[in-house]
Amino acid sequence: MRTLHTRDMTQGRPLRLILSVAFPLMIGNIFQQLYTVVDAQIVGSVDGVHALAALGAADWFNFLFLGIVQGLAQGFAIPMAHAFGAQDMPQLRRCVGNAVILAAVLGIAVALCAQVLVSPVLTLLGTRQELFGMARLYLRILFSGFPLVMGFNLSAGILRSLGDGRSPLYAMMVASGVNISLDLLFVAVFRWSVAGAAAATVIAQGASFLFCLYRLSRLSFLRPGREDLRLQRSVWTRLVSMGLPIAAQNAIIGAGGMAVQSIVNTMDVAFIAGYTATNKLYGVLEIAAISCGYAVSTYAGQNLGAGKLGRIRRGVFQAAIMSVAIAMVTAGVMFLVGRPIIGGFLSGSEAEVSAASAYGCEFLYLMSMFLPVLYLLHNYRSALQGMGCALMPMVSGIFELIMRVGSAAFLPGILGYQGLFIAEVLAWAGADLVLLPSYYLFLRHFGGGHLPPSRGE
């Protein structure tokens, strides 16, 4: 079944189908990361190293709650992909209706919880006094927009579950244009510093949410009836059983990042600024990985719904090969242009900028060398989630936490500040050690490619 930009991924060449969804998502994520990077570059270039360091002090705490929201929405979309793959439209509408109710309640609850924890957590992280006020204000404004973030992530997740990668792309293009324009106005013209950057982000998120709602309104087969908008135990428990483990996985990763940030916060401002500049590029480094991951999750979900496990095995393997190739190209680009990009985040005295740039480039080059490890992580984690296995991806998040925090705690005593950089790569490797064997064991449990061919095989 195909309507507008929806795509049935249970028939046709696996890699071509995965790319047809991944490519528009990749372009959309480029726009999303563009405005994230521009946020930091405008704040850093207009207000200096201290303002950029304040954004860095807030990064992982923001990621923690953003990851919870994104994980819930991503998990809610998985049963929708199963229903769409099975061509069960009544079940699909029930999933959508129940997910809307859950998202509204949970989006508000997460926003309130985050607001309450802002000051205590920044204190616990040992945020430097000169950065504390700016980081707190930045987070309070961002968290006020979390219901909009939940709305966007759910609506984009619904569209992706139907094989529609274009609509989230267009939404990100809208958000990027709004965010960059407002950044220039609020930060460069009005001089609102980090508050202006946060306000621009919230307004842009609202714009992308409205765009996705418009696209969903055009899908008549998806429109829930009155009965679909009533919580049904069998439906909402399935949604929650998928959403909570992914949210917990993201929260665990975020907690590990916060623990590392507390160590980073003990360093000088130049180190914090350089580390922050590279962390802002982290999203750029994994753009293709995240995009391919979403496509693999949709592909695996639809084919599981159709009972085509053999197609899952072939498609995920082909996507893994493609991901490694993309990771190597991305790394090459970073080695060529990483230094001037890092420099674009920084302003201040020559000594401050030089020191921060050196730290940032060293971190960037190390991560770039090991990007295939990160890309395989996203590929196999997404495949497991798409097939309805949420437990092992969550366990991989625990291993990621242990490796990240353990390495960051002990390696600096042996290797100096470089130990903080190596901790990130070791965290990726720890997750892969769980995900790859889990994926193949999961396939074997369900029969793998040994099932008889089904429709379109």
Image (cartoon, rainbow, N blue to C red):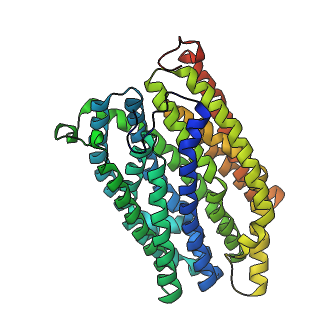
Residue 311 left/right relative to 118:
right
Along the horizontal axis of the image, is 283 left or right of 333?
left
- In the rendered view, would you say 104 is above or below 86? below
Q: Residue furthest right?
A: 415
- In the image, residue 281 sits, relative to residue 49, either above or below, namely above
In percent of width and height, residue 75 lies at 43, 40
Quadrant housing the N terminus: top left
Q: How many marks?
A: 0
Residue 308: x %, y % from top left: 51, 21
In the image as oriented, which residue stretches furthest toward the left? 226
From the top left corner, tell me how far across and down residue 28 is, in percent: 53, 56
In the rendered image, is residue 419 in sight?
A: no
Residue pictured at 55% horizontal, 42% vertical: 20
Pick the front one: 188 or 234: 188
Residue occupying the point 25% across, 43% down = 223
Q: Is residue 272 left or right of residue 237?
A: right
Establish if 293 lies above or below 237: below
Residue closest to the eye, 335 or 433: 335
Who is closer to the viewer here, 403 or 434? 434
Residue 204, by quadrant, is bottom left
Residue at (42, 50) in percent of width and height:
156
Name the spot of residue 277 as percent of width and height, x first.
Answer: 67, 69
Residue 261 can be seen in this image: yes
Q: Quadrant of the C terminus?
A: top right
Residue 451, quarter of the rendered image: top right
